[in-house]
Amino acid sequence: MGNMELNAVVTQRHTLAPGLMIMRVAPDGWELPEFQPGQFAVLGLPPTAPKCEESDTADPDLKPDRLIRRAYSIASSSKSRQYVEFFVVLVKSGALTPRLFALEPGDKVFLAPKITGMFTLQDLPDGKNVILVSTGTGLAPYMSMLRTYLAQHHWERVATLHGARHSWDLAYTAELDTMAALAPNFTYIPIISRPRDEAIPWEGWSGYVQDLWTNGVIEKQWGFKPEPENTHVFLCGNPAMIDTMVKVLEGEGFNEHTRKGPGNIHLERYW
C-alpha cells in the first residue's frame, strides 16, 4: 500500500456541538481486525486535504508526502466490525482534526489496519464493580466497552461518570440513559462545570467529574462505598483529572495497574 493511499471511507458524521463530532469510518476493500474494547486506531489524511473553516490558518511544518496520523479511541462495539466509530473534538491549531472536520460521508481517509492499546478490560476479574471516569472525548473507549459487554453481566455494578463543560458536550446521553434504564446494575452520572451557560436550568450535578467521587455520589446511588477489594476504576481524558483522581484513590488504598503489578486503577491520558 502506498504511503498516501486512503483505504477507508467516512460512512456517517454527526455534529453534536461546534467542534465536536461522532464519525464512522469503514474499511474500503479490506476487513477490520478483531480488537479489544478500549483500544485505539490511527486515522490519517494528507497535508493537501482541506481544513474546516474554524481551524487556525497556520500549519505546523508538514511533510508534503507524509500522511498526518493521530490515534483515536474506538467508541463502537468490538462485535460490530463493519465500521469503527470515533468521538472527536476539534483542535483548531492541530494538524489533523481541522481536516477530519472537513470530511463528509463518502470522503476517503486513511485507517491503519492495526488496532492497539493497553486500556482494556482484559485483566479485569469477573464479579467486581467497575467505575468508568471520563472527561470530554475520553468517554469513547467506555462506549466500546459498554456496547460490547454490558449485556453479558460480567460485573457486579458498573458506573459511567462523564464530565464536560456544557450539557451539549456530553455525547451519547440518550444511549447511556437507555442502558441505565435497561440494565439494573448500570449507573450513568453526567456532570458539567459551567451550568450558568445552559439555556434550560441544569438539573444534574455541577462541578468536575472528580467531585462525584469525593462527594460520595456513587456511594449514595449504590448504597455502599466502592473499595479496592471490590472495585476497579478506569480513568480517561484530561491529565489533570487523572492526576487528581489517582491521588484521591491512592489515599483510599487503590493502586495503579501496570504491566509489572496488577492494580485496580487503570488509566489513559489524552494529549
Image (tube, rainbow, N blue to C red):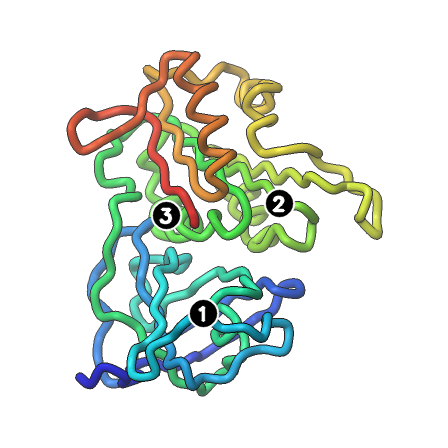
**Residue wearing tag 3:** 145
Q: Is residue 224 above or below residue 37?
A: above
Q: Is residue 65 above or below residue 120?
A: below
Q: Residue at x 45, y 87 (%)?
A: 106
In front of the other: label 1 or label 3?
A: 1
* Structural crowding at the residue carrying mark 1, measured as other residues with C-alpha within 10 Å and reported as few (<14), some (14–19) or many (≥20): few
**Residue wearing tag 2:** 164
Q: Is residue 14 above or below residue 170?
A: below
Q: Residue at x 46, y 38 (%)?
A: 239
Counting residues from the start of the chain, the first of labels 2 and 3 encountered is: 3
Q: Which mark is residue 60?
A: 1
> Which amino acid, by three-letter code, is at mark 2?
Ala
> Which amino acid, by three-letter code, is at mark 3?
Met
> Which amino acid, by three-letter code, is at mark 1?
Pro
Counting residues from the start of the chain, the first of labels 1 and 3 encountered is: 1
Q: Quadrant of residue 223?
A: top right
Q: Residue at x 57, y 65 (%)?
A: 92
Would you say the residues marked 2 and 3 are in contact, meaning their CB atoms lie under 8 Å apart?
no
In front of the other: label 2 or label 1?
A: 1
